[in-house]
Image (spheres, coloured by chain):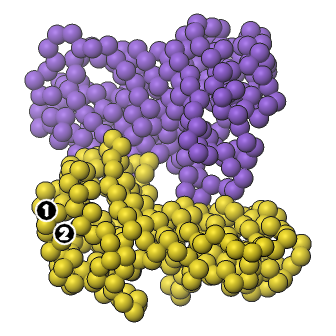
Chain colours: A yellow, B purple
Amino acid sequence: MTRFKLTIEYDGGPYVGWQRQDNGPSVQGCLEAALLRLTGRDIAVYGAGRTDAGVHALGQVAHIDLDDARFDGRKLRQAVNHHLKPAPIAVLDAVAVNADFHARFSAIERAYLYVIVSRRAPLAIDRGHAWHVRQPLDVAVMDEAAQRLVGFHDFSSFRAVQCQAKSPCKTLDQVTVTADGEEIRITATARSFLHHQVRNIVGTLKMVGEGKWTADDVSRALAARDRRAAGPTAPADGLYLVSVHYPPVTGASPANT
Amino acid sequence: MTRFKLTIEYDGGPYVGWQRQDNGPSVQGCLEAALLRLTGRDIAVYGAGRTDAGVHALGQVAHIDLDDARFDGRKLRQAVNHHLKPAPIAVLDAVAVNADFHARFSAIERAYLYVIVSRRAPLAIDRGHAWHVRQPLDVAVMDEAAQRLVGFHDFSSFRAVQCQAKSPCKTLDQVTVTADGEEIRITATARSFLHHQVRNIVGTLKMVGEGKWTADDVSRALAARDRRAAGPTAPADGLYLVSVHYPPVTGASPANT
């Protein structure tokens, strides 16, 4: 039995989200179906982050256990990608790891990117891949306000009502807001996030960018510890799980890397 | 009667190309249909560049004549975009211009971008929006070889057999090849291009990047003035018409700009 770490890119548009659900196709379900076609066996895929419907990934991480000596990482990547066609899901990398590696529980940092396109005209090329905001946004004040959220806080105001995390307290390591022409990019990194936390932060920062809220209003929303005190949830279209980081491996990893 | 200059973005994926054709939906046809719904009249749309099936535009330019005092540029943009829904076509800008402005014949420079993604794994997010090349490419030698094509030349070797231009001689003003991670961007500017010229240049430069051809081979292919002497045609997916430039306007433009 070999445990493999998979790094996965997907367009979340056609999916009900990462997690298998009864109401439609999921990314996890597509990967498991591809593995069933490949191996003839039911193989469970464990993801690092349960992205919501419509949320994309540039570098989701998952692990699987495979009892098949035919496969090293390279062959596994190629074979799974072959069986994934024509789904907009691609295994970027597959590597054998120690048996105690867990995509979700071993993760020490997750990085998200949120893309806003701020312009009058509708989106043609980037439709489904960014949030189209018609109002001009002041990126400098958005970035300034975002810094109010960095650190260890009770993020109840930015947490979906249906969030299942035991505690609303998280450490937000970093948030940045930058612009490149009409494209505004918001990055956020933390060990883990609450449900909708990034999208609720983005929806709040957009109000700041429009001039409806100040950085002090963001601090007050955070202090309120009440979902109704913060801004609306930004749409899924603009959100990307960029990467998941793990501690450096100590000790030898299996030979068939 | 007012002439309007429209700047247009579109995803070329669903279309047979810019130009109206019998075999499927075209970008020009969609714009004319939107204008018919808006005004109740047949209004011809004249484009600067007849992009092929699957080719995208970030800044195509077209002109129309409108005999309707209700519309200034801003209202026209909004109304056309409303009637274009749900097509992945967006009017970015509409501005009244002098009656002698012609989107195609007044243009003095066209800029194209070609996007290659060079990696092993298939494309999920960028599918249809870039050329997926599995081989590693040497971008520095591609850029060096590209410079052999700059200037006034007989481009017969890079011209589609079905090209209708009177002369195969064109001045290529500039070509650059740059990389950002796995994404390789090739830009090309000229007053005008032959049919498939950019895609044939890209197909040839890819052979250079793979190490199959040298810059001298590119010079020889150019000198042969024979389509069979150059590389294959790169796919439409990676090509974007970025912008079209016109001489500065002399004299007053109409009041309802």
Task: State the residue in front, A10 or A169.
Answer: A169
* Residue B205 on image: x %, y %: 69, 28
Residue B54 visible, this angle: no
* Residue A230 on image: x %, y %: 20, 75
Q: Which mark is residue A214?
A: 1
| Rendering quarter of residue B245 | top left
Q: Check if mark 2's residue and mark 1's residue have beta carbons within 8 Å.
A: yes
Q: Residue at x 17, y 56 (%)?
A: A210
Q: Is residue A159 above or below residue B173?
A: below
Q: Which mark is residue A218?
A: 2
Task: State the residue in front, B69 or B123.
Answer: B123
Dot 1 amino acid type: Thr
Mark 2 nearby-residue class (10 Å; few <14, some 14–19, many ≥20) = many
Q: Residue furthest front?
A: A251
| Rendering quarter of residue A129 | bottom left
- Chain designation of label 2: A
Q: Quadrant of the C terminus of chain A?
A: bottom right
Dot 2 amino acid type: Val
Please give left or right for residue A198 compared with residue B111 in the image: left
Q: Is residue B238 above or below residue A23?
A: above
Q: Is residue B39 above or below residue B64?
A: below
Task: State the residue in front, B68 or B96.
Answer: B96
Q: Quadrant of the N terminus of chain A?
A: bottom right
Q: Which mark is residue A195?
A: none
Q: Residue at x 41, y 77 (%)?
A: A193
* Residue A190 on image: x %, y %: 43, 71
- Chain designation of label 1: A
Q: Are marks 2 and 1 on the same chain?
A: yes
Q: Residue at x 28, y 27 (%)?
A: B5
Mark 1 nearby-residue class (10 Å; few <14, some 14–19, many ≥20) = some
Task: State the residue in front, A67 or B225.
Answer: A67
